[in-house]
Image (tube, rainbow, N blue to C red):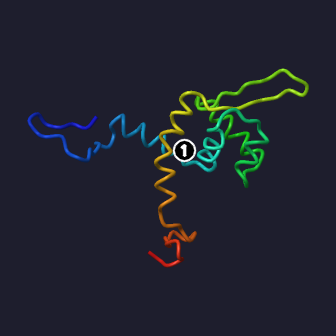
Amino acid sequence: MPRIPIGQARPAVVTYVVGDDECRSYQSVLEFVGRRWVGAVLMAGSQGARRFGQYRALVPGISDRLLAQRLKELETYGLIERTVIPTTPVQILYQPSRTGAELVEALQPLIVWSANRPESNGHGNHIDRAGSPI
């Protein structure tokens, strides 16, 4: 938590001292969610249990190898639960854990915000929806 001297009012915008546990935790989450395909895979599972092929259809462009790797990472971090259904053939379902659902909920405002932002032209320059440089 930021340090505010006694007798001073709490500022409207809280700034964190680099090195605070909250700052490190926040940065860690942003780096993980920002990894290629992690956010897309999390969002694809946000509507409930899905099979591998359903994830693949909802995240176009991801390879089977990378999807399997991301699902395993999300399971390792406790964000996705893997359920094996002993049928013939065996069915494996992936669904967000309680923590994963909380993360998806926390990401919703960022998704809305990003949908309203100018788009990048792929060269680090931003363009508005009409194609004009910003």
- Against 81, is 113 above or below? below
Position in image of residue 84 (x %, y %) = 77, 24
Position in image of residue 40 (x %, y %) = 62, 47
Q: Quadrant of the N terminus?
A: top left
Residue appearing at x 78%, y 29% in the figure:
92
Q: Is residue 107 left or right of residue 54?
A: left
Residue appearing at x 51%, y 69% in the figure:
124
Q: Is residue 122 left or right of residue 116?
A: right
Q: Is residue 25 left or right of residue 34?
A: left
Q: Residue furthest front?
A: 47
- Residue 9 is drawn in which quadrant? top left
Q: Which residue is mark 1?
A: 33
- Residue 95 is drawn in which quadrant? top right
Position in image of residue 10 (x %, y %) = 18, 40
In-front residue for pair 121/72: 121
Residue appearing at x 84%, y 20% in the figure:
86
Mark 1 lies on a secondary structure that is helix
Q: Is residue 20 left or right of residue 100?
A: left
- Against 100, is 64 above or below? below
Position in image of residue 33 (x %, y %) = 54, 44
- Against 24, is 59 above or below? below
Q: Residue furthest left?
A: 7
Q: Residues within 10 Å of mark 1 (few under 14, many from 20)?
A: some
Q: Residue furthest right?
A: 88
What's under tag 1, amino acid-wise? Val
Count of numbered labels shown in the rendering: 1
- Residue 74 is drawn in which quadrant? top right
